[in-house]
Image (spheres, helix red, strand yellow):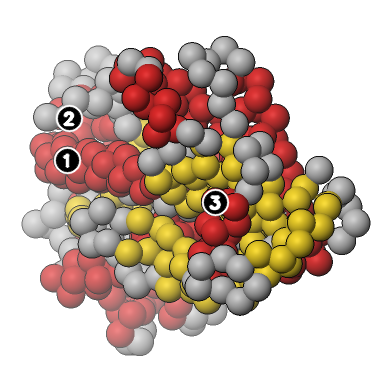
Amino acid sequence: MISETRPHTVLVVDDDEVARMLLEQALDSMGYRTVLAGSAESAWDLLQCNHDICFACIDWMLPGMSGPELCGRIKQEIRDRYVHTVMVTSKAAREDLIAAIESGADDFLSKPPDMGELLCRIHAGERVIQYDKSLRAESEKTDRLLESILPASIAQRMKKGEMRIADHIDECSVMFVDICGFTATCMRVEAEELIAELERLFNFFDDRIQRRGVEKIKSIGDAYLIAAGVPEPDPEHAVHLVETALDLNRGVRELGEAFSQPIRVRTGIASGPVVAGVIGRKRFIYDVWGPTVNLANRLESMAPEGGILVDARHRELLGDRFPLRARGTVTPKGFRPQAVWELG
Amino acid sequence: MNPTEPVLDISSVSVFAAIDPDGSRGIARKVLLKFAEGLPDRVQALVEAADRRDPIAIQVAGHGLVSGALSVGARALHVRAAAIERAATDGNLTELVEQLAELQHCAAETRKAIIARFGGAGDF
């Protein structure tokens, strides 16, 4: 038996008022709530607005859309729940049963319905409804988990079956943020205190990143990799990432005052093309690769404590919307000499 | 009239026996009187369809009678309405006049039987 606390609502669709009355009385005596429709069209309207309906007893011959057509439409178009459909008809031939089931009906009952048969068919339908509900609940849990580790649009694509995600992004902005002297701090502070402070800091980072609508790619030890313009294009990626960098810098200063050791971060930002995709078979990771990522990483390591260094392309995209000071030319490992600017 | 099929056999409708075995809730009465109330119109719809020699309309009206008759245990009427529906589906209307006359007579008998068992015209 089903452990539902309230009975399902059953939709009875029949153009014959007497047949509707009979089923209504029968279902009512079994403790089910009923809603009645005299045509497939009005039944369809009820299904759209009453989401409690997950069981339908449908006559075959109806004015307008037929019963089998309604069953087919229910199966094709109702996605938010499973609706168990039973054809209740005066047709009784085997070919009618086959045609009804083929059209999308889940079950078939001849008129007048036998009470015992009606009840056991409803119970059979309720088992399917319960399985469907359990499956949907599990699926929602999986979706939430997937969306907690991957960007929402990437999770959606994977749910639709796209298993190999590798996108070339023409232009985006990539930022590395690293806590200055974290390794030395590790040696001086108790492990529990260190983890608690790092957690507060990273929670703050996560919050700001989410508010700014940019994408946290990953944290690597005490460093953060953040991108704007991935996976979805953002024409203002450069601005959004700089605003995030300023937010994080400010927050770190404020939070750091309450920490066991004063903390500062270094930030490096570069703009340009990247390859973005998902790797891993058992544990998915959304990541970005390419020279733009490497350059942001190198700039971060060259930035002064509390400083934000940006590359030439990023500076060009920002224009004069933020104060930038030229910091000469640097030659990061693996790159030609690069002109860099410091924010602020 | 087909002597093998009773005009009214409420026991063939298991819903009535299951939910209102002694009739104290008046469910069979309510449903059957509703059927009897609408029966003349159902028959009239079939007659009009037959007058137009419109097989689809005959089929639809015939099916409506089949469905209603089955729901209340009007077995003789069900047999006659089913025969007309089948003939219309097959496009064979050669015996329609005779079939229709039999059905009209059967419908009147059915209505009479319902009223005799459950109440008069004033109950409609």
Residue B74 horizontal/vertical position (percent): 25, 48
Task: Name the residue beneath numbered marker 1.
Answer: A127
Q: Position of residue B85 (x, y in %)?
A: 33, 71
* Percent of width and height locating residue A51: 46, 39
The numbered disc on residue A301 is 3
Q: Which mark is residue B38?
A: none
Q: Quadrant of residue A265?
A: top right
- The residue nearer to you, when weighing A335 against A279, is A335
The answer to which of marks 2 and 1 sits earlier in the sequence is 2
Above or below residue A164? Residue B72 is above
> Which subunit holds the residue at mark 3?
A
Q: Residues within 10 Å of mark 1 (few under 14, many from 20)?
A: some
The residue mark sitting in front, 2 or 3, is: 3
Q: Secondary structure at mark 3?
A: helix
Q: Amino acid at mark 3?
A: Ser
According to the image, label 2 marks what residue?
A2
Q: CA distance from mark 2 to mark 1?
A: 7 Å
- The answer to whether marks 1 and 3 sit on the same chain is yes
Which of these two is toward me, A313 or B51? Answer: A313
Q: Mark 2 and mark 1, same subunit?
A: yes
**In which quadrant of the rendered view does residue A95 lie?**
bottom left
Q: Say which element carries label 2.
A: loop
x 36%, y 79%: residue: B88
Residue at left offset 40%, top offset 46%: A220
